[in-house]
Amino acid sequence: MCLAVPAKIIEIKDLLAKVELSGVTKDVSLMLLPEAQVGDYVLVHAGFAMQKVDEKEAEETYALLNEMDGAPRTVEALS
């Protein structure tokens, strides 16, 4: 089983993107998703951007991850 988490692309240089997730930045490869642009949300797994997702889906995922960490339930407020 694998887990991919959404991250926002904040910078692109060639096929390497800098993404941000919860205040942490990381470099990921765009080899599998060369059409991605700055501002896009992408699912990241093992250092690769795998798929684009919309901002609403990314926010729902962040809310669910926060709930798993003990935060109050907020997913319904995003609907």
Image (tube, rainbow, N blue to C red):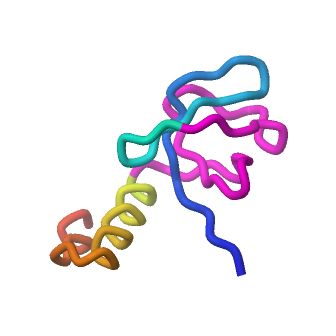
Does residue 42 belong to the magenta stretch? yes
38 left or right of 2 in image: left
* Residue at 44% in and 56% down: 58
50 left or right of 40 in image: right
**Above-or-below relation of 19 to 3:** above
* Residue at 61% in and 28% down: 37
Say which of 32 and 48 sits in front: 48
Image location of residue 22, percent across then percent down: 37, 48
**Above-or-below relation of 73 to 24:** below
Image location of residue 49, percent across then percent down: 69, 47
Q: How many marks?
A: 0
* Residue at 30% in and 68% down: 66
Say which of 53 and 2 sits in front: 2
Image location of residue 38, percent across then percent down: 55, 26
Say which of 68 and 33 sits in front: 68
The quadrant in which the C terminus is found is: bottom left
Quadrant position of residue 2: bottom right
* Residue at 82% in and 44% down: 32
Image location of residue 46, percent across then percent down: 73, 56
**In the displayed image of the protein, which residue is found farthest to the top?**
13
Does residue 28 belong to the magenta stretch? yes
Instruction: Tell me which segment is drawn in magenta.
Output: 26-55
63 left or right of 71 in image: right
The quadrant in which the N terminus is found is: bottom right
